[in-house]
Image (cartoon, coloured by chain):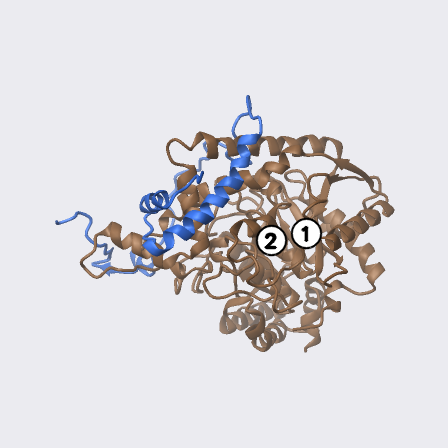
Amino acid sequence: MSELIRKDASELSALLQAGDISSVELTQAHLDRIDAVDGKVHAFLHVDHQGAIASARAVDERRSNGDALGPLAGVPLALKDILATKGLPTTVGSRMLEGWIPPYDATVVTKLREAGIVILGKTNMDEFAMGSSTEHSAYGPTHNPWDLERIPGGSGGGSSASLAAFEAPLAIGTDTGGSIRQPAAVTGTVGVKPTYGGVSRYGVVALASSLDQVGPCGRTVLDTALLHSVIAGHDPMDQTSINSPVPAVVEAAKRGDIAGMRIGVVKELGGDGYQSGVRQRFDEAVVVLQSLGAQIVEVSCPSFDFALAAYYLILPSECSSNLAKFDGIRFGLRAGDDGTRSVEQVMSQTRAAGFGDEVIRRIILGTYALSAGYYDAYYGQAQKVRALIAQDFAKAFAQVDVLISPTAPTTAFKIGEKLDDPLAMYLNDIATIPVNLAGIPGMSLPIGLAPEDNLPVGIQIMAPAMADDRLYNVGAALERALLAQWGAPILSSMAGV
Amino acid sequence: MAAISRDDVAHLARLARIDIPESELDHYASQLDAILEAVDKVSGLDTSGVEPMSHPVKMENVFREDIPAPSLNAQQALAGAPAVEDSRFRVPRILDEE
């Protein structure tokens, strides 16, 4: 294995800037790694060998011309297949968009290209980002590099698995209820869901528009911050984009000083239903945070107990509306158009043929929740619960600077274990959902392996809206202390793919 | 009592324009029934006097200047279409002839 692929993006950045390595060499090393292991991991749906090398060569040329380049110029990245990429397939893990090639780039993709970041390919995901295991991909599951029989989390399992398998040093995900943070937790990597509106959603296939957010994934807090600062910022093409300065995430990731900080442990996110090894590693992390000078208090957010129920009314309602555009008329699949059927029959056949079970379940559920007679009891009530959850966060942040909890209730489970029990699958996101409902930022960071199964455990850090920098400050402090304790990064204890 | 029946699923699937095979209706009905029972938990919280929250960021009337700018041409816009005729999307018949 090339040593280059094990290096962090910030180390690679230094080597590139010093002229010690070229981006072509670095990109080729990652493509070789993908070719060697992705048959087993299946993190990627499309690998863009030619495009990646061409981008790398262009960056190398600009560097040799003495052009001013950003810190991540020439560093390769894995992109979740939910972001539109001009000239490169974008399937969203669905048969509905098999073979579709977008005619434009998502704003995030434009920013990545402008920063000289090399896109290696598109990563696997649960179909239309609906799922917590990547098993709902129409193209087959992604396998967790820690144990190939286990799930890598979802919906962004491909992005996190690509980091853990050293196929890419950086990745982009999207997070609607935990799809960046839960995969990060179960693969021993870092992932951040930024403040809602902090990163443009233009060109991102919408699941639930009031919850979706694009975010950075990396193997270290600093790498994740560097990527965050590339993709964040106001975009006139997204009307929900926040028009204010990007929080100073890179400075915070370099600082990592939490002396005197007030950190709240959320009482409702932990305890019963959480695996013992998850609870143990979390409790140990709390002690570490305390030893670094933080003041730990327990905070109660009583309406969080209702977050999962509210989420599974709001999300299906929004997605049933958003996915109406997939009707076989303007792009993607069309089924049953043999000249005898009407447009409505063709739409119905197309949607039955193009959507998988989980997508159909959620569309039906949303159609039900929004239908006359049920609207107030379901969607209306869920929106009020959402308001109470936001109020709980506001009260908590009046007492503390950040909140913490385990990211996920368990470590990675076996592929197939929960596939036919949607409710059991939904419970994976029980700790991550409140953050999306309130629109605040959240990070997952590895805090060790559960003693009973030797699989990674993540801690979730939550901050007020537009205080994303606090996540990186706390994350960097904890990461540094844990690294000193362990002597090596968590991924070095992985057996290897 | 089940909140959602086989017939309800068939009706909702028609509304959502998804041609679910007869043989799969019972399976969907039982799964959706379990999900609905779980999400019904929201009714257990007292929300009197609470304003519904539809969005995390309060924004309204986000306008921009109406300035002409390049956009996709017809060929680019039609490139991903399942069927094209005379530089337009070709669609199955809209009106029933029967």
The residue wearing badge 1 is: A444
The quadrant holding residue A32 is bottom right
Residue nearest the observer in this picture, A424 or A26: A424
**Residue A441 visible in the displayed image:** yes
Residue nearest the observer in this picture, A385 or A173: A385
Decide: is A353 above or below A477. Answer: below
Residue most extreme to the top: B49
Tell if the residue under mark 2 belongs to the same chain as the one under mark 1.
Answer: yes
For residue A180, the mark is 2
- Left or right of A368? Residue A434 is right
For residue B50, the mark is none
Where residue A103 sits: x, y (%)? 39, 59
Q: Subunit of mark 2?
A: A
Residue most extreme to the front: B1
Decide: is A427 above or below A82. Answer: above
Of the numbered discs 2 and 1, the one sitting upstream in the chain is 2
Residue most extreme to the left: B98
Decide: is A317 above or below A230. Answer: above
Look at chain B in the picture and name its colour. blue
Where residue A341 sits: x, y (%)? 21, 55
Query: What whole-number distance in Å separates the C-alpha atoms at marks 2 and 1?
Result: 8 Å
Q: Amino acid at mark 2?
A: Ile
Q: Quick one: which chain is brown?
A: A
Q: Subunit of mark 1?
A: A
Circle 1 Cα neighbour tier, 10 Å, few/some/many (<14 / 14–19 / ≥20): many
Where residue A33 sits: x, y (%)? 61, 75
